[in-house]
Amino acid sequence: MANWQWFHRLGSPKWLLHTLNRWLPWLLGAGLVLLIIALAWGLAFVPPDYKQGNSFRIIYIHVPTAVVALAAYYMMAIAGAIAIVWRMKVADMALRAIAPVGAALTLLALLTGGIWGKPTWGAYWVWQDARLTSMLILFFLYIGVIALYDAYRERRNGNRAAAVLALVGTVNIPIIYKSVDWWSSLHQPASIKFSEPAAIAPEMLQPLLLAIAATYLLFAALVVLQLRVQIVLNEQRSQWLGQYAQQLLRGRKSAAAAPHK
Amino acid sequence: MAGHGRFVWSAYGISALVLAASVLHPLLRYRSEIKRLQRRATAQQVAQQVAQQAGQR
């Protein structure tokens, strides 16, 4: 029989805060180190593209942020579903933690894509393109979720409205993904496929895969940072948090008082 | 970067700024909330001690 203890522990904000504090330095450190390696590799050690020259190097920011922005939306929608079905307050906190990070990633994908578009297509933005428009809609969905969860006097109602919007908006994700196949699009089709070999040179692909992995780790670190704030805000009247804060204070004072060995 | 430098560096530059802000904003917010809780706990302790001393007199 599967051990579901971890799921119940996950619902405890106290256990969660302690665990998040333990993981944060590793997630942030590993993400930053891998990202720096991937970007340095992509900027300095990959030959220029035969058509695009050096502007293609924007791919190492554009693709990872776009990929993780999409994945983040699904995770946010799942958190919303769990919040509605199981009324789990940690799920509400998770939704509020993922939304701003997803919005920032989508914004970066849009901006870097536009900057890349100028030397490649001659335009920063093209309205007729389905991929661009559906990514812009994704950004509006994130902003909508953020606006909703703080728009109600009762926090519960805001949580539910935001969760519903997150769920309704999931239809956008396959549209974004398939837009380059379904409509004639300026944006190029997928270079990395599950069924065929990649349409991108391996020397260009390797740092890209590393950058994607690094961005997933950084996404986790950023969500952890947001989630810690949500826990503290939610639990500020609880006893365990007051004691935890006092423990930190005493720990800091005793560390300052004791002579370093 | 053979003429494409301003595109590549502006893209990387904006990304660095957004990443830095995304780390610093929640980090500083968390620390200030913890400090607020510490101040409240200390104030409560002081109030309790004052009440105890007043009770003893």
Image (cartoon, rainbow, N blue to C red):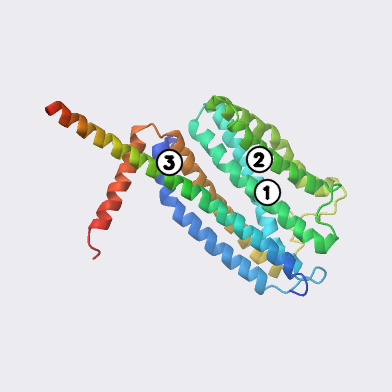
Q: Residue at x 66, y 32 (%)?
A: A165
Considering depth in this image, is A111 or A57 the residue closer to the camera?
A111
Marks 2 and 3 belong to one chain: yes
**Location of residue A33 in the rendering, given as x and y in whole percent from the top left corner:** 53, 64
Instruction: Identify the image quadrant of the N terminus of chain A.
Output: top left
Q: Residue at x 68, y 48 (%)?
A: A106
Can I make out residue B28 in this image? yes
Judging by the rendered image, the residue that carries numbered circle 3 is A16
- Structural crowding at the residue carrying mark 3, measured as other residues with C-alpha within 10 Å and reported as few (<14), some (14–19) or many (≥20): some
Identity of the amino acid at label 2? Answer: Tyr
Instruction: Identify the image quadrant of the C terminus of chain A.
Output: bottom left
Q: Residue at x 69, y 32 (%)?
A: A168
Element under disc 3: helix
As drawn, A13 above or below A33: above
Q: Chain of mark 2?
A: A
Whether residues under marks 2 and 3 lie with C-beta atoms below 8 angstroms apart, the answer is no
**Location of residue B17 in the rendering, given as x and y in whole percent from the top left corner:** 60, 58
Element under disc 2: helix
* Quadrant of residue A151 within the rendered picture: top right
**Location of residue A22 in the rendering, given as x and y in whole percent from the top left corner:** 41, 50
Disc 2 or disc 3, which is closer to the eye? 2
Considering depth in this image, is A160 or A202 the residue closer to the camera?
A160
Judging by the rendered image, the residue that carries numbered circle 1 is A106
Q: Between marks 2 and 3, how big is the CA–CA gap? A: 25 Å
* Quadrant of residue B11 within the rendered picture: bottom right
Disc 3 or disc 1, which is closer to the eye? 1
As drawn, A109 above or below A202: above
The mark that comes first in sequence, 3 or 1, is 3
**Location of residue B45 in the rendering, given as x and y in whole percent from the top left corner:** 25, 36
Q: Between marks 3 and 1, how big is the CA–CA gap? A: 27 Å
As drawn, A67 above or below A30: above
Judging by the rendered image, the residue that carries numbered circle 2 is A142
